[in-house]
Every structure is written in structure tokens, then in C-alpha cells.
Image: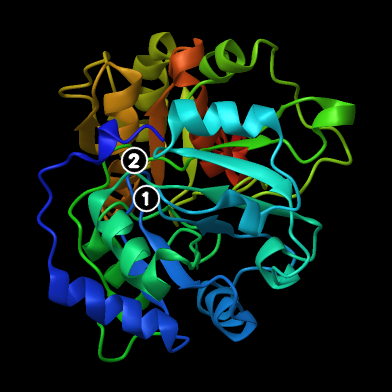
């Protein structure tokens, strides 16, 4: 496995790791850091722990969760079969932000797969996550770990975000929050379906930092888009990753006129933007400048959405982003965050 990303300077608190591992082994829930976002962890082979994850998040029981495993894990324990394509992707991208969907081994509880015959598995590169996975059940267990937030809300990239969602350790649905600093990547892993490789080839279910082009270069074939029979996967509902404040995306050239119109009807706007500068435009309550590169933007995205959600604005306006391949993951998250706000601008401006 490729362990280059795991050589972080993050401090490992051995006592905290042991405490978290024991909580998991007892069937408890532990929020833990990964390089993508913080996960809400439970023993992947304990149906009661998985049920507790679903209950804490308010997550539909048919929506599968991803199993996190250590770098030394035997993938064959989790999967009924591991195709050569999976081995190639593991060698190229693990540990890292890539989830593989494989045929589920018969002894793995169907609860972790949302009742499907497939299972999502990944090996995180965050050193705290790896230390926890190596301590939990002697490195032979798997941690089911969807994002540590209420279902459909903005994913957490810091321990404080987790506490905002679930409360303090004393009164929380979460037994322990393991702090590992801010997540490096900032958006969830790329998900590739290999469970139907013989009939459908590799299928991109969710874009992320590892682009479809990079995966295709390893496999030698392009990734297909999901069809009606594709497995359900984490974070693929139309509406997801959303703050409480409505989100809309607007092209840079349209921003000055739009912000003026919104001010004219008394709308308070929180603006997330890259290149456009709106200094002095009435109605903009707060501006969050964002990085120009896709990776840096992804790192800051969820923190920006959370900050803007607390700005007292009526609307979060996000400057639309480039459509190149490296922006696919970020654009996917923003599209889902804004899904429930479709048509909102037209309704507001028409009065």
C-alpha cells in the first residue's frame, strides 16, 4: 500500500487511542479524524453499533456506510472476491481518499451495507485514524464510519464541528470524540464500484479528490456513470452536505447585478467567492474569500459553509467554480448542498 500521506506531523495520543478503541470494542460510538472528514465510528461487525450510528445521525437504514480498515488489513476478509482492478487501485491510492465497492463477504453484517450484497471499504491515510484502526481489535477489525454529522448536513472537518452536531462528550450520543486536527482533504472520498466489474466495468459513484482520470489511468479504461442498478453509496443523494441557510451558486459575471437586486429586496447575503470582490456592495453581510486551487478550496469548503451558516444571512451565495476535472468533487458537493434551493433566486426576485 502507498503510505506516503500517512507521514503527517499530527501527534498521536496513545492513551486517547486506547480509550477510543476500547469504546468501540464495547459497542460504543467514537468520532474520529480522517484525511477527508471526521467519521462517526462503530464496530463494523456489530449490528447494534451500526444501528446506533444510524440512530445518532438520523440516517435511513438502507443507506450504506463505509468500512475503514488498517493498512495491513486483509481485504479478502470483507469482500467475497477482490478483482485485480481493486488490487491495482489499492496499490496506487491506499492509504488515501478512495472507497471501493466490492461484493460483500457472507459473514459481514448486511446492516453495514444497507441491506445490499456489496460493501464499501477504504483505508484512511490520517495517522490518528490509522493508529485507532491498528489498536481496535488488534488491527483486525473494521470501523464503520459515515461522516460525524446529522444526516444530510455539512460534514465535519474538525472535532469542534462534531461537538456542534452532537454536543459535548458528557451528554452526547457519541461516546468519545478523538481529536486529530483539521482534515487535510476536506471532502469525502471518491467512491468506485467494482462489485459488477464483469458486466459494468468500473463505475464512479461519487467524485472526490482522486479524480476519475487518475483512476482510469491506473485501470486502463474510463469509469462509467451509475446506472439504475448501481449500488447505493454514501453521500449520493441529490440533497446532501447542506447548511441550514439556503445555498445558491451564481456565475462570477452575474454576481454584481444579483447582489444589488438582493439588497434591493432586503435579503442579507453571505458570500463565498474566489476571484470576484464585492467590497461595498449593500446586503452582503459577510464575505468568505476562498483559495483558487481545487484541493485548497476543498480543504476549506465545509468550514466555510458552517461559518456562513452562522452569519445571520438569509442566503449563502457561492461563486460558481471551474468545470475542469480537478473541480469535479467540489462541484458535486456544492450541487448537492444547493439542491433544495433550486428556483429560490427566481422566486425571490419575482417577489
Quadrant housing residue 254: top left
Q: In the rendered view of the protein, which quadrant contains the C terminus? A: top right
- Image: 222 above or below 334: above
Q: Can you give x and y, in whole percent of width and height, for residue 275 in the image? A: 26, 13
Q: Between residues 78 and 271, which one lies in front from this camera angle?
A: 78
Q: Is residue 177 left or right of residue 65?
A: left
Q: In the rendered view of the protein, which quadrant contains the N terminus? A: top left
- Image: 263 above or below 181: above
Camera sees residue 291: yes
Q: Can you give x and y, in whole percent of width and height, for residue 305 in the image? A: 34, 45
- Mark 2, secondary structure of its residue: loop
Quadrant housing residue 105: bottom right
Q: CA distance from mark 2 to mark 1?
A: 6 Å
Q: Residue at x 50, y 64 (%)?
A: 142
User: Neighbour class for label 2 at 10 Å: few (<14), some, many (≥20)?
Assistant: many
> Where is mark 1, residue-wise?
37
Q: Residue at x 34, y 40 (%)?
A: 186
Camera sees residue 234: no
Q: Residue at x 57, y 11 (%)?
A: 217
Q: Is residue 171 left or right of residue 47?
A: left
Q: Residue at x 10, y 44 (%)?
A: 9
- Mark 1, secondary structure of its residue: loop
- Image: 79 above or below 114: above
Q: Are marks 2 and 1 in contact (CB under 8 Å)?
A: yes
Q: Can you give x and y, in whole percent of width and height, for residue 282 in the image? A: 24, 31
- Image: 111 above or below 309: below
Which numbered tag is attached to residue 186? 2
Q: Between residues 158 and 3, which one lies in front from this camera angle?
A: 3
Amino acid at each position: 500500500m502507498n503510505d506516503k500521506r500517512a507521514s503527517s506531523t499530527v501527534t498521536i495520543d496513545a492513551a486517547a487511542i486506547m480509550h477510543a478503541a476500547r469504546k468501540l470494542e464495547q459497542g460504543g460510538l467514537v468520532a474520529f479524524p480522517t484525511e477527508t472528514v471526521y467519521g462517526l465510528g462503530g464496530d463494523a461487525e456489530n449490528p447494534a453499533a451500526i444501528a446506533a450510528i444510524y440512530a445518532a445521525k438520523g440516517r435511513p437504514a438502507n443507506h450504506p456506510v463505509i468500512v475503514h480498515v488498517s493498512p495491513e488489513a486483509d481485504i479478502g476478509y470483507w469482500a467475497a472476491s477482490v478483482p485485480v482492478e481493486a488490487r491495482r487501485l489499492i496499490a496506487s491510492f491506499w492509504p488515501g481518499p478512495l472507497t471501493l465497492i466490492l461484493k460483500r463477504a457472507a459473514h459481514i453484517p448486511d446492516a453495514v451495507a444497507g441491506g445490499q450484497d456489496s460493501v464499501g471499504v477504504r483505508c484512511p491515510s490520517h495517522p490518528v485514524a490509522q493508529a485507532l484502526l491498528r489498536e481496535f481489535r488488534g488491527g483486525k477489525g473494521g470501523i464503520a464510519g459515515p461522516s460525524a454529522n446529522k444526516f444530510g448536513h455539512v460534514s465535519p472537518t474538525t472535532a469542534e464541528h462534531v461537538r456542534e452536531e452532537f454536543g459535548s462528550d458528557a451528554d452526547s450520543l457519541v461516546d468519545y470524540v478523538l481529536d486529530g486536527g483539521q482534515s487535510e482533504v476536506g471532502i469525502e472520498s471518491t467512491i468506485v464500484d467494482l462489485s459488477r466489474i464483469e458486466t459494468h466495468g468500473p463505475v464512479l459513484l461519487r467524485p472526490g479528490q482522486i479524480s476519475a482520470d487518475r483512476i482510469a489511468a491506473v485501470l486502463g479504461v474510463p469509469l462509467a456513470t451509475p446506472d439504475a442498478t448501481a449500488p447505493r453509496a454514501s453521500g449520493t443523494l441529490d440533497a446532501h452536505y447542506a447548511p441550514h441557510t439556503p445555498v445558491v451558486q451564481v456565475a462570477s459575471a452575474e454576481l454584481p447585478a444579483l447582489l444589488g437586486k438582493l439588497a434591493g429586496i432586503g435579503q442579507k447575503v453571505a458570500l463565498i467567492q474566489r476571484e470576484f470582490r464585492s467590497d461595498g456592495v449593500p446586503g452582503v453581510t459577510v464575505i468568505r474569500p476562498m483559495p483558487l486551487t481545487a484541493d485548497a478550496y476543498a480543504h476549506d469548503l465545509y468550514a466555510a459553509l458552517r461559518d456562513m451558516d452562522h452569519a445571520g444571512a438569509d442566503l449563502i451565495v457561492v461563486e460558481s467554480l471551474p468545470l475542469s476535472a480537478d473541480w469535479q468533487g467540489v462541484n458535486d458537493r456544492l450541487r448537492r448542498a444547493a439542491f433544495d434551493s433550486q428556483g429560490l433566486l427566481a422566486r425571490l426576485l419575482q417577489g
